[in-house]
Image: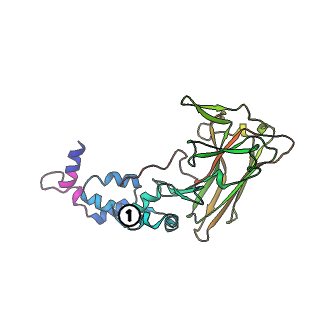
């Protein structure tokens, strides 16, 4: 059936009739301006006219964010030299590392909007140089392949900053944390909360501020954090995406500086047994489940 439809689109729905293949490529390109990249790639399979329009630089220029030249500057010239706009979109839809590979930025493959992730390695962590308090361990559950683990501290404070020409949009900043430590045993994931303590005695304070004047502050007990989708409390042994707040970017120039932190500095008790993976900055209405993936060629 698929082959028959393709032939009809190429040669006309009936002998001597007019088919999709007779639509001018420029007209098809105008329609593609309103479609998502996956939809364009699917329609490109119909006929030559659609394939030509699906490779048009004008179509893919419209899908790229205004700051894509800055993203290309983070890559070696040989990676993007001579690429079409479609090739550039495909390249930037995969994570682009910067800041010693501790930060990644990429385009969402459906909307073309900017997403970013910042490793715990790029953050300032109080007492992180003392292995009695903090250490790092490898993990394939992190996009950076490494996770920070708080063993025991009295003064808990983590902060970070990033400067980037974010395109105009509304963004959400989240911390990715995990109560307890986890490992694999006989191929199965095992979570250990034996050394988790102190977090129920006082709230963690999350803060967000930007060079544009936006600020968000919130406090919560880790055990009271709720999943927005499931509307049930998180159980120990699961990654928690804690939403700190939102900020608005009106212009890419000047560069936006984003500062963030999480702290619990009540020194009347110790706390420990917490993993910190990363901080994410994504468009606010982007589906949380969306991840980077392969892009059609």
> Residue at (64%, 34%) from the top-left corner?
237
20 vs 161, left or right, is left
In the rendered image, the residue lying farthest to the left is 15
Give 11 or 145, whichever is nearer the viewer. Answer: 145
> Residue at (18%, 57%) from the top-left corner?
18
Is the residue marked by circle 1 packed among few (<14), some (14-19), or many (20+) residues within 10 Å? many
Quadrant of residue 2 within the rendered picture: top left
| Residue 110 within the magenta-colored segment of the rendering | no
255 vs 201, left or right, is left
In the rendered image, the residue lying farthest to the top is 186
Percent of width and height locating residue 278: 63, 49
In the rendered image, the residue lying farthest to the bottom is 254
Percent of width and height locating residue 89: 43, 60
Quadrant of residue 84 within the rendered picture: bottom left
| Residue 15 within the magenta-colored segment of the rendering | yes
The quarter of the picture where the N terminus appears is top left
Percent of width and height locating residue 130: 76, 47
Percent of width and height locating residue 86: 39, 61
Q: How many marks?
A: 1
In the rendered image, the residue lying farthest to the right is 268
Q: Which residues are magenta?
A: 8-24
Helix, strand or loop at label 1? It is helix
Give 199 or 123, whichever is nearer the viewer. Answer: 123
Looking at the image, residue 94 lies above or below residue 212: above
Residue where numbered disc 1 is placed: 59
> Residue at (81%, 38%) from the top-left corner?
201
The quarter of the picture where the C terminus appears is bottom left
Looking at the image, residue 73 lies above or below residue 262: below
Quadrant of residue 103 within the rendered picture: bottom right
Give 190 or 128, whichever is nearer the viewer. Answer: 128
Give 148 or 223, whichever is nearer the viewer. Answer: 148
């Amino acid at each position: 059936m698929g082959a028959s439809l393709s032939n009809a689109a190429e040669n006309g729905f009936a002998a001597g009739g007019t088919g999709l293949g007779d639509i001018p490529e420029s007209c098809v390109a105008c329609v593609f301006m309103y479609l998502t990249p996956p939809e364009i790639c699917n329609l490109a399979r119909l006929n030559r006219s659609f394939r030509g329009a699906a490779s048009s630089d004008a179509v893919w220029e419209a899908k790229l964010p205004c700051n894509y030249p800055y993203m290309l500057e983070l890559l070696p010239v040989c990676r993007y030299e001579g690429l079409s706009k479609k090739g550039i979109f495909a390249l930037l839809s995969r994570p682009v590392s910067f800041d010693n590979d501790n930060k990644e930025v990429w385009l969402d493959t459906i909307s073309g909007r900017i997403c970013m992730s910042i490793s715990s390695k790029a953050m300032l962590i109080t007492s992180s140089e003392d292995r009695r308090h903090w250490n790092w361990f490898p993990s394939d559950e992190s996009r950076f392949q490494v996770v920070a683990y708080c063993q025991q501290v009295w003064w808990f404070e983590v902060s970070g900053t990033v400067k980037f020409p974010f395109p105009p949009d509304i963004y959400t900043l989240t911390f990715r944390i995990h109560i307890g430590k986890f490992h694999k045993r006989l191929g199965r994931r095992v979570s250990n909360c034996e050394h988790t303590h102190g977090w129920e005695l006082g709230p963690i304070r999350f803060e967000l501020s930007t060079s544009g004047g936006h600020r968000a502050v919130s406090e919560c007990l880790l055990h009271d954090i709720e999943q927005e989708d499931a509307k049930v409390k998180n159980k120990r042994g699961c990654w928690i995406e804690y939403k700190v707040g939102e900020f608005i970017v009106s212009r890419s120039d000047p560069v936006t500086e984003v500062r963030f932190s999480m702290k619990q500095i009540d020194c009347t008790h110790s706390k420990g047994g917490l993993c910190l993976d990363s901080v994410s900055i994504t468009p606010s209405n982007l589906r949380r489940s969306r991840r980077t993936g392969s892009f059609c060629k």
